[in-house]
Amino acid sequence: MENLPEYTRSQLALRNGQDKPEVWIAYKGLIYDVSRSRLWKNGKHYEHWAGQDLTPELADAPHDEWVFQNLDVIGKLK
């Protein structure tokens, strides 16, 4: 994971499912591609929006961080 590309918050924000075809989210400094997930259709997952760091929002989720195990890590958040 040390050779992953780094992306800024602005670059992450463009991958919100609206501006570009990619749908990305960040959690604990890593960026995940959720483009293929049916749960992130159009960049929305319940009350959460893609293109942002969801680390502080996990406390309100009905699941734990284990959900990130099945997602593709594609970069690091600068």
Image (spheres, rainbow, N blue to C red):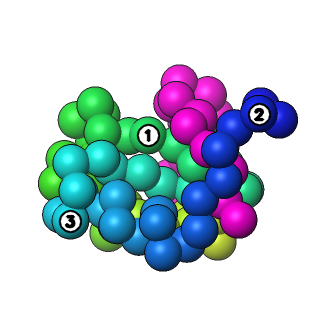
Q: Is residue 63 magenta?
A: yes
Give the mark count.
3
Q: Please indicate, yes or no, whether residue 64 appears anywhere in the rendered image.
A: no
Kindly state the secondary structure of the residue where label 2 is placed. Answer: loop
Could you say which is closer to the camera, residue 70 or residue 60?
70
Looking at numbered disc 2 in the image, what kind of residue is underneath it? Asn
Measuring from the top left, give residue 6's x and y in whole percent.
Answer: 66, 53
Q: Is residue 43 left or right of residue 3?
A: left
Residue under numbered circle 3: 19
Residue beneath the point at 48% across and 75% down: 10
Disc 2 crowd, CA 10 A, few/some/many (<14, 14-19, 20+)? few
Query: Could you say where residue 26 lies in the image, as x and y percent from the top left?
Result: 57, 56
Q: Which mark is residue 45?
A: none
When the figure is inspected, residue 73 is found, relative to residue 45, above or below; the finding is above
Where residue 77 sits: x, y (%)? 66, 59
Q: Please name the residue that numbered disc 1 is placed on.
A: 33
